[in-house]
Amino acid sequence: MATGTEPHPNSGGVRSATRAAIDAPHLRTDRWWLAPATTAAGLLAFIVYSTWRAFSNAHYYAAPYVSPFYSPCLAENCRTMHAGPNADLFGSWWALSPAIIILIFPLGFRLTCYYYRKAYYRSFWASPPACAVAEPHRTYTGESRFPLILQNIHRYFFYAAIVVAGILTYDTVLSFRDEHYRWGHMGLGTLVFLVNITLIWAYTVSCHSCRHIVGGKLKHFSRHPVRYRMWQFVGRLNARHMLLAWSSLVSVALADFYVYLVASGVFDDPRFF
């Protein structure tokens, strides 16, 4: 006689002897699938766009703007494309798009970000797809095995993200020039870069690793008033980490797209003064 505790015929994942033998995969009747589907669509759109721009190796500089996907230019082939800033650390042997050298750091930071991990685990891997919705996987190992154990290097990508944000800040300062590199000018692209770098810094600083670096391992906040205020500030930003993650993702794509439009001759950058 059935007792209601027998294993489900298709036992796997959360379906085990300790769970109620309910035939329905879940009891939610709302549109629970909308959030993970929207997240997947947004992330997929950025992946497609950034991949296209990274491998296009063209239209990434329009004086005085350089695309955030390509800055700083670290290869000789970047020097042949424009006369802008060029560190040329990789020399002439690097034949691929110079953006590939740069994007690995901000993308690594975002891929290992605590929020983004939750976002793409749910949207692409359905692990789990939503609250109170069983995931389809039979086993769950978390981030204890390869390759997900590499998520632990997030704190190191944070340090690289700080450097990248500093470089983009420098590019934003250079945007206060005209096409002849004369200072004291401002265009629509300058505003685009200002909005982008503000969101980039806000997202980077709101990172959980930053919050731990600022206020972690302190037993008495009263003995460290400066770090305590910094921890409070980062904590307020951290509460909006998801919003800042999406806003900065959109802004960096828009900044690159703006440079692409100007560099490809679609329109000239409007100058305010």
Image (cartoon, rainbow, N blue to C red):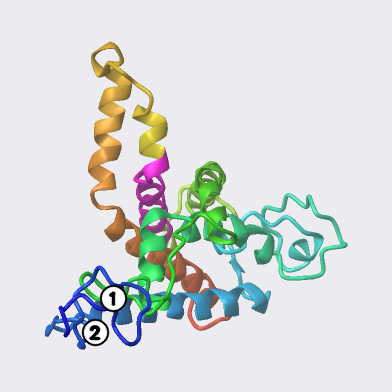
Nearer to us in this view, 206 or 188: 206
Residue reaching furthest right? Answer: 93
Indicate which disc residue 88 carries: none
Mark 2: amino acid = Pro
Q: Magenta part of the protein: which range?
A: 192-209
Magenta run includes residue 200: yes
Nearer to us in this view, 257 or 130: 130
Secondary structure of the residue carrying tag 2 is loop
Q: Earlier along the polypeptide chain: callout 2 or callout 1?
A: 2
Secondary structure of the residue carrying tag 1 is loop
State whether residue 36 appears in this view: yes
Magenta run includes residue 260: no
State whether residue 248 appears in this view: no
Q: Residues within 10 Å of mark 2 (few under 14, many from 20)?
A: few
Quadrant of the snapshot with the N terminus? bottom left
Q: Which residue is mark 2?
A: 25
Q: Is residue 29 left or right of residue 194?
A: left
Q: Quadrant of residue 115?
A: bottom left
In this view, 269 is above or below 174: below
Q: Is residue 47 left or right of residue 246?
A: right
Q: Do labels 2 and 1 touch, CB within 8 Å?
A: yes
Overall secondary structure of the magenta section: helix
Mark 1: amino acid = Ala
Q: Which residue is mark 1?
A: 134
State how far apart marks 2 and 1 are (Cα): 7 Å
Q: Is residue 144 left or right of residue 91?
A: left
Question: Which residue: 21% across, 80% down?
Answer: 21
Question: Which residue: 23% across, 42% down?
Answer: 236
Residue 237 in the image: x percent, y percent?
Answer: 27, 45
Q: Quadrant of residue 2?
A: bottom left
Residue reaching furthest front? Answer: 1
Nearer to us in this view, 152 or 54: 152
